Amino acid sequence: MAAPLLLRNCRPLGGAATDILMAATRIAAIGPGLEAPPGAGEEDAAGLLLLPGLVEGHTHLDKTLWGMGWWRSEVGPLLIDRIEGERASRRGGFDAAGQSARLARDFLARGTTRIRSFADVDTEIGTAHADALVALRETLRGTLDIQVVAFPQSGLLVRPGTLALLEQALRNGADIVGGLDPSGIDRDPKGHLDAVFGLSEKHGKPLDIHLHEPGELGAFALELTVERTKALGMQGRVVVSHGFCLGEVARAPALYAALAEAGIAVATTAPPSRPVPSVRAMRAAGGRIFGGNDGIRDTWTPYNTPDMLQRAMLIGLKNEFRRDDEIAWALDCVTGWAAAACGFSGHGLAVGDRADLVLVAAETVAEAVVAQPPRRLVVSHGRVVARDGALLG
Amino acid sequence: MAAPLLLRNCRPLGGAATDILMAATRIAAIGPGLEAPPGAGEEDAAGLLLLPGLVEGHTHLDKTLWGMGWWRSEVGPLLIDRIEGERASRRGGFDAAGQSARLARDFLARGTTRIRSFADVDTEIGTAHADALVALRETLRGTLDIQVVAFPQSGLLVRPGTLALLEQALRNGADIVGGLDPSGIDRDPKGHLDAVFGLSEKHGKPLDIHLHEPGELGAFALELTVERTKALGMQGRVVVSHGFCLGEVARAPALYAALAEAGIAVATTAPPSRPVPSVRAMRAAGGRIFGGNDGIRDTWTPYNTPDMLQRAMLIGLKNEFRRDDEIAWALDCVTGWAAAACGFSGHGLAVGDRADLVLVAAETVAEAVVAQPPRRLVVSHGRVVARDGALLG
């Protein structure tokens, strides 16, 4: 157990300067002029802006080429080109465990203390990536929370044997069942969704479905997902990732309402290149929406970084958030809203919340989002874990 | 005249390492193992990636709040809200000259050596902003090129007196005539376009028209612009900025072809939040397209930075450029293509081109675009002007 830590003179979310006392991994007290208990460490925040620990709600740690030499992309434009290109690239040998750990550490150095990561499960690599992420989760326990989604990236029903491997990954410790484009990849929306919901129910695990399918095809998959979520009582335990169809079909308002009523959250990466779910519309419907990077510098895309403030900026730009009160929602997408939707408990800046804190040189939350200043200090579980962008120890 | 400068061991656009000799503001020789002439300065690039000087093709230096305290935005959602909000904010006093200079310097520190900037001209501020930018252009001559566009931000015909002020700004030294939403703001597409083309013709100045108008309304304005460009023989001297309608109407292919045939270039800021002109489609039609930030941290938007590599990333994301050869086009949008479309001469990395060079720690052009590494060295007109992001002298 770390010694208590007193952070002096910080401005939570740009509010008035105050002190924060942390003890036993939690925020113990907040207020100006707090006394440091005996043996406590002390840090002077010098009036910097304080953010809660950042949350990555949708990424693929096991795919990243981050920190390796540059990989020249000559991949074709189709989804299946990318899936097959990636599988082919791995046959030359790829250290998914080492790369996942490298990227996770760089997330932490930039203030992210909770990550939901997918791990590919297929008939070539089996459960190796999922197992590696489960091992990483255990290694980092107490410093960085990782949720592992067993994810059938290369298809489920179209690739016989994958369903059994997904189940094995869950037995090996994966936290969440992943689904993928039930019509577009698996060619059987009912069959695919029955299979992944069945696995969720059998193992008592939440579900996260990647839905890239466009227009009415995607909307149909959403409807099937809503029906099953309600029938199985899985409200609050299902996420639909991407959901591009919500940015496309005229009847999106009814779909937002149905998702909200079924307690299904939407994860958005807010790609500039295509229509996406609207943060404003999903919130107005009473539903949950949050953010993630998707892949970071991998064979799918060279873009993105392990910095959730850059993702917040892209969410803000995509949703045309210009006012300060709107830009604060972009931060919510990578902090509290993501934590709530993914089921990461104890997130926040109130007494009793886990002491995960980030200090940046910014006047306001909006400035932190648009400028993404370096992380001066990152605290996780009440311990200082990074300073000026570099991990300690 | 600066002494000759020999840059050793740089990799132009990621190619093989070579040396570059600069003399009398130009690139004098390129090749491995060059000899430094007597009196020449020398720099060791240590194998870093070499880019040509970056080009900002569309910004508003005179509006920026960059480097000032944070301005809390509570502005409404309409275009007219933003125009009026900005005019109101200026009544409290705003140092357009000082702010323009501050932002221009930060552009230079990040490797931009050529800027096309709009300057608001209206019946409240008169020609003051345009005059300030003309003065800045002269101050920076020989270090950073600035083109000044006299721009009727608050409307031209709807605000009587503005046309005479635009003309006065040209007499005072502005380089280019600006136009703005002939239907949406001025309510008279024929009248507005006749007025700005007339001014261009009378003064022999190029034209840059901001066209936010959606769908068929915007397409109609494009057609009127094409007709006038051809009738007046102004091919190669007209830019349409934004042109969102090109991302919206089904007949866009015919419009790209008409723009290409009339020698009209398109400036895009590639905003994630709405459809935009396609870089791929405009190039395939044989036309010119290039990039710019638009406003940088002003009352219109808090986003954007004086870093053209960030803009290139956003152009790449918007156009879904994933392959290395595609991402190189995103760099072209903020280098050679922008220089050619704006009429900045001598841009490039060949012998005889002006010696404007940028060094970054990246393996490839694509890495420079996605990662936007700090600028290790910036050379303008053959002189080192910035190191590690800081201007010299």
Image (cartoon, coloured by chain):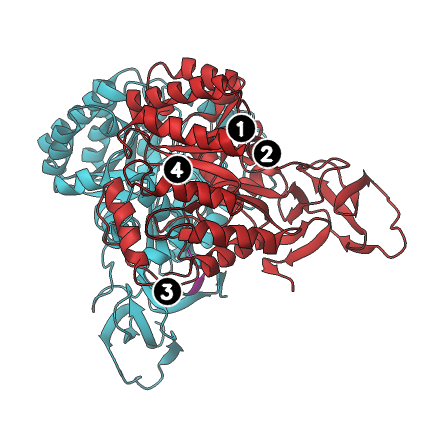
Chain colours: A red, B cyan
Asked which quadrant contains residue A236, the reply is top right
How many neighbours does mark 2 have within 10 angstroms: few (below 14), some (14-19), or many (20 or more)?
Answer: some
In the picture of the structure, the residue carrying the numbered disc 3 is A69
Indicate the secondary structure of the residue bearing disc 2. loop
Amino acid type at mark 2: Gly
Q: Residue at x 74, y 47 (%)?
A: A25
Asked which quadrant contains residue A95, the reply is bottom left
Indicate the secondary structure of the residue bearing disc 4. strand
Amino acid type at mark 1: Arg
Q: Residue at x 59, y 61 (%)?
A: A390
Q: State the image coordinates of residue A149 (x, y, percent, origin top left).
A: 47, 41
Q: Residue B103 colored magenta?
A: no
Q: Is residue B220 visible?
A: yes
Separation (CA) of disc 1 from disc 3: 38 Å
Question: Quadrant location of the N terminus of chain B?
Answer: bottom left
Mark 1 belongs to which subunit?
A
Mark 3 belongs to which subunit?
A
Separation (CA) of disc 1 from disc 4: 53 Å
Secondary structure mostly seen in magenta is loop
Range of the magenta residues?
A: B372-376
Q: Nearer the viewer, residue A290 or A129?
A: A129
Query: Who comes first in sequence, dot 2 or dot 1?
Result: 1
Amino acid type at mark 4: Ala
Q: Nearer the viewer, residue B294 or A34?
A: A34
Whether residue B191 is situated above or below residue A359 in the rendered picture: above
* Circle number at residue B119: 4
In the picture of the structure, the residue carrying the numbered disc 1 is A237
In the picture of the structure, the residue carrying the numbered disc 2 is A343
